[in-house]
Amino acid sequence: MPLDFPLFPEAASTMAGQVDALYIFLVVLSAFMSLLIGGAVFYCAVRYRRRSEDEIGSNFHGSILLEIVWSAIPLAICLLLFFWGAKVFFAQSRPPADALEFTAIGKQWMWKFQHPDGQREINTLHVPIGQPIKITAISQDVIHSLYFPAFRVKKDVLPGRYTTVWFEATKTGSYHLFCAEFCGAEHSKMGGQVVVLEPEEYERWLAGGAAASQSPAEAGAALFEQLACVTCHLDGDGGRGPALRGIYGEDVTLNDGRTVVVNDEYLRESILTPAEKIVAGFQPLMPTYKGQISEENVFKLITYIKSLSGGRETPAGGAVDESNVPQDAATDAATEDTP
Ligand code: CUA
């Protein structure tokens, strides 16, 4: 009988070996402990069974040495597992700084992906090999979970909050991607393929077919104008809202004295519920955009604001030249929500 029953999914990322090693160690350890304890129970049951009706068991008063040994060894094993697990967890939670930034939106029942330069895909994701890929994800409705078995990474995708998952593919090919959180009637269909390509192939793929008319930062710049954000967020001081150039990744002081770091999460909150965290020295004048702007468009605005701080999107370290943004950008941005 050919042994083609796969015990493990294919391992195709830098993370896979680390996760598998920890997993195999846990399985082997559990098997060893089960056999050890089960064997000891069985041996003692037979060896020390009652042999005659009036037999009386011997008295046993314990041993300090034994107590210490069987406390210390499990403690050492548990601590090893804790630190080993934490190491893998941190590796999974911290995308490298040079990662390509993708976005994903989960909705009943599909995955919508966007590439750093604007290409969009549904339920299929093309990525280059040997390059860290960071996916910032959010859900438009219920809780989903983005799962790449071959990369050994999985992250819940939540409504109202960004989560990120990252991987670096080590093998070209096509692998499954799944939703790993029961999310309704068609949960089982909410999946697809992740296709790992050689860098040149990926460039060719980007160039061909569904080329984006503009990058997410450019689309965000157009949206920034269309929503009239520019009237308050001027390019210098003196606006009714804080100037946005160079703020991404920096600390900002709020009017209640707290300090927050300007990241994706804070920008999203400030767009949707601006009154939550007002920057010191400003009034809570900004209207809420909750319910008026799609998650996709929030991503675009954030990417634009990031690009003002020298993000990867920015040509030559400056702002996106808004005069180059096509006029239909706003309409494009407004209509692309329907898949
Ligand atoms: Cu989405 Cu299950």
Image (cartoon, grey):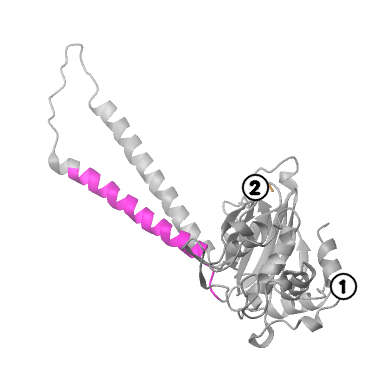
- Does the closest atom of ligand 1 sit within 8 Å of the Cβ of label 2? yes
| Residue for point 70% across, 59% down | 287
In the image, what residue occupies the spot 66% across and 88% down?
Answer: 316
Which of the two labelled residues, at mark 2 and mark 1, occupies the earlier sequence position? 2
Residue that appears at 37% across and 54% down = 82
Binning the other alpha carbons within 10 Å of mark 1 as few (below 14), some (14 to 19) or many (20 upward) gives: few
Q: Nearer the viewer, residue 12 or 106?
A: 106
Q: Quadrant of the C terminus?
A: bottom right
Name the kind of residue labelled 1 in the image: Asp
**Which residue of the protein is positioned furthest toward the bottom in this rendering?**
316
Q: How far from the left and from the top, in percent, is residue 176? A: 68, 57
Residue under numbered circle 2: 143
Q: Is mark 1 within 8 Å of ligand 1?
A: no
Amino acid type, residue under disc 2 in the picture: Ile
Q: Residue 277, how many percent across, how many down?
A: 56, 60
Query: Residue 79 colored magenta?
Result: yes
- Residue, disc 1: 328
User: Residue 269's spot in the image, x, y percent?
Assistant: 62, 59
Residue drawn at x 40%, y 45% is 30
Main SS category, magenta section: helix
**Res 126 seen here:** no
- Seen in the image, is 274 located left or right of residue 51? right
Compared to residue 222, the image places residue 314 above or below, namely below
